[in-house]
Amino acid sequence: MKDRQTRGKFGPFGGCFAPETLIPALRQLEISYQRIAHRKRFRERLDYLLKHYAGRPTPLYLAENVSRYIGCSVYLKREDLAFTGAHKINNTLGQALLASLSGKTRLIAETGAGQHGVATATVAALFGLKCQIYMGKIDWERQYLNVVRMKLLGAKVVPVTAGSQTLKDAINEAMRDWISSFKNTHYVFGTVAGPHPYPTIVRDFQAVIGRETKRQILQATARLPDYLVACVGGGSNSLGLFHAFYHDLSVQFIGVEAAGHGLTTSAHAATLCRGRPGIVLRKQRSAAGPDVAEHTVVGWQELERHAGRVHLHRTRTAVGHKYAVHIRKLNNLMVLTRTVEIRRVRLFEAYVAACRVDAPVAPGREPVAAGHHVDQVQSLG
Ligand SMILES: Cc1ncc(COP(=O)(O)O)c(C=O)c1O
C-alpha cells in the first residue's frame, strides 16, 4: 500500500490512493507504459503519427496585433491547429498507440465539453478500436454538436445522469466501467490528474508542446521567453508546455485558473489558488472547496467546481503544478525553485480585447502563449 502511494509522487502530491478494485487496472497500465512507451519503435511511431496525422509541429505564431496592443512580444503556440482542434490529440494518440500495442480492443474516456471525447473517438477509429465515451447529461445537452461528432466517428456516447451530470460524474462512470473491463479496455484519461500513473503518462504525451515551443522560440528570437502563460483546467496543456522549460530558471510560469463566481465563494475552479490538500479522485491533490479538511479522504465522488466554461468544471488539477506552488511557498528565497504564479485574470474582458486585435485568439480556439516582457499581458487582468 505504501509503495503504491509513493510511486508517481510530485513532492507530497500525486501517488496512488485508489480503491482496491481499481489497483489491478492501474498496475497493469503502469507496467505496459514502462515496458512499451519508452521503446524506440514506440517513440518513432508516435512521432510519425503526431507529424503526419495530427499535423505537428504546430506553429509558434508571433501575434503582432496583440503584441502592438499590449506593448510586448506575444507568441501563441497554435494548439488549435492540431487535428481535432486542440492539444487533446497529443495525449489520445499516445494512449491509443499504447492500448493497441498492449492488446486492448476497446477505449473508454470521460469528456466535459467534448474535445477529449472527440479526440478519443478519432484515435479509436484510426486504430480500429471500439469506443465508449461518458459525458454528463448537462454537458451532453450543452455540447450536442460534439456528441454528434463522436457518434459519427463510431463511438457510443453515454449520457451520465448521476450527481451533477457533468465531468466529475462522467469520470466516476468511466472508472466504474474500467474496473470490470480493463482486461480488454484502456481508459484514455484526459488530463494530468487521477491516480498514478495517469499524471505522468499524460504529462509525457503532452510534453511535445514545450519541446516544440522551445525549439521554435529559440529559432525565432535566439533567446528563451520570459514567461510562459497557459490556462489550467486539469493542467495538461500547461504542464505539457512548461515541462521542457523546467530547468530554465529564467523562465517564469503563469497558470491561469478560472475564478467562476469568485475566489471568496466555493463556486470556482481555482484549486491551485485556493485549494487545500485532500485526496480526490484517487490521488492526493488540492481540492477546490473551502470545506475540505486537510488530508481528508474525500473518496470516490468529486466536489463540483465552477469555471464559467463547461469543460473547466473540475475538482482535479495537475499534481505537478501543485508541487511547484508548494515548493515556492516553502522555499521562496531559493533561486532554484520555480515560480508558478496563478493569477485571477478578468478573463472575459482580456479575451474580447485580444480577439478584436488578433483572430487566432478567436473563441473556441486553444491559444497557449509564450511571451516576452509579459508584464503588460498580466495587466490585461
Ligand atoms: C480546448 C481545451 N483547452 C484546455 C482544456 C483544459 O484542460 P487541460 O488543463 O488539461 O489542458 C480543455 C479541457 O478539456 C480543452 O478542451
Image (cartoon, rainbow, N blue to C red):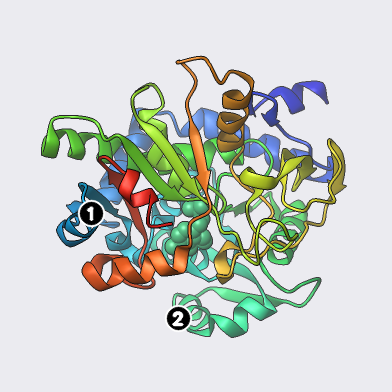
Picture residue at 18% right of the left edge, 29% below the top? 223
Q: Earlier in the sequence, mark 1 or mark 2?
A: 1
Q: Residues within 10 Å of mark 2 (few under 14, many from 20)?
A: few
Mark 1–mark 2 distance (CA, rounded to whole Å): 22 Å
**Whole-percent x, y for residue 135 in the image:** 64, 72
Query: Quadrant of the rendered structure where residue 132 is?
Result: bottom right
Kind of residue at badge 2: Leu
Query: Residue 134 at x, y = what percent?
Result: 65, 69
Badge 1 residue CB within 8 Å of ligand 1: no
* Drawn side of residue 240 relative to residue 372, left or right: right
Quadrant, the N terminus: top right
Q: Amino acid at mark 1?
A: His
Q: How many residues crowd around disc 1 within 10 Å: few (fewer than 14), some, or many (20 or more)? A: few
Does the rendering let one see residue 57? no
Mark 2 — residue?
A: 152
Q: Is residue 190 left or right of residue 8?
A: left
Q: Which mark is residue 309?
A: none
User: Toward the viewer: 300 or 97?
Assistant: 300
Looking at the image, which residue is at 66% across and 65% down? Answer: 306
6 sits to left or right of 187: right
Specify the quadrant that holds the C terminus: bottom left
- Seen from the viewer's position, the closer of residues 321 and 253 is 253
Residue 52 can be seen in this image: yes
Q: In the rendered view, tell whether residue 82 sits above or below residue 378.
A: below
Q: Secondary structure at mark 2?
A: helix
The residue beneath circle 1 is 52
Label 1, secondary structure: give it: helix
